[in-house]
Amino acid sequence: MDFPKGSEWRRWDLHLHTPLSEDYLNSAVTDEDLVSQWEKQNIACVAVTDHHVIGVERIRNLQALADGRTTVFPVSNCERMSSGKSTFI
């Protein structure tokens, strides 16, 4: 991305799941669908936070499809049980 004006507001989504998360509601969603939605919503950066996994192949594909228009960070959303309560780390 090229930002000639320097500092400016951009839209980021730092908690995004894909069909790799076991509780994702629509497993038919493709990587192309995701990238298309980011572009429609003018999202500059996403953090893919699938549950308990970093889907390396999917991340690389999303990065290639976004082609610099959206930055894609790999993150893992891990959950542990403590005293009967879920804690996300």
Image (spheres, rainbow, N blue to C red):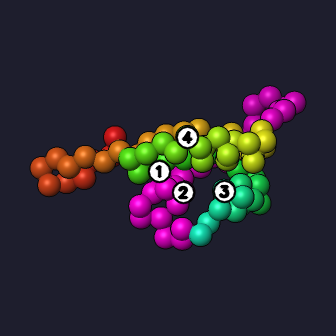
Q: Earlier in the sequence, mark 3 or mark 4?
A: 3
Specify the quadrant that holds the C terminus: top left
Gap in angstroms between the C-alphas marked 4 and 2: 12 Å
Q: Which residue type carries mark 1?
A: Asp
| Mark 3 lies on residue | 31
Q: Which residues are magenta?
A: 1-27
**Magenta residues, dominant SS class:** loop
> Can you tell which of label 4 and label 2 is closer to the viewer?
4
| Mark 2 lies on residue | 18
Front residue of 5/68: it is 68
Answer whether residue 4 is magenta in the image: yes
| Mark 1 lies on residue | 50
Q: Are marks 1 and 4 in contact (CB under 8 Å)?
A: no
Q: Is residue 15 visible?
A: yes
Q: Earlier in the sequence, mark 2 or mark 1?
A: 2
Q: Earlier in the sequence, mark 1 or mark 4?
A: 1
Q: Which residue type carries mark 4?
A: Val
Q: Are marks 3 and 4 in contact (CB under 8 Å)?
A: no
Q: Are marks 2 and 1 in contact (CB under 8 Å)?
A: yes
Q: At x 65% / y 40%, what residue is drawn?
A: 60
Gap in angstroms between the C-alphas marked 3 and 2: 8 Å
Q: Earlier in the sequence, mark 3 or mark 2?
A: 2
Q: At x 52% / y 45%, what residue is drawn?
A: 55
Q: In this picture, is 85 found above or below 59?
A: below
Q: Earlier in the sequence, mark 3 or mark 1?
A: 3
Q: Earlier in the sequence, mark 4 or mark 2?
A: 2
Residue 16 in the image, given as x and y percentages of width and height: 54, 53
Look at the numbered disc 2 and give the secondary structure of its residue.
Answer: loop
Q: In this picture, is 18 found above or below 76?
A: below
Gap in angstroms between the C-alphas marked 2 and 1: 6 Å
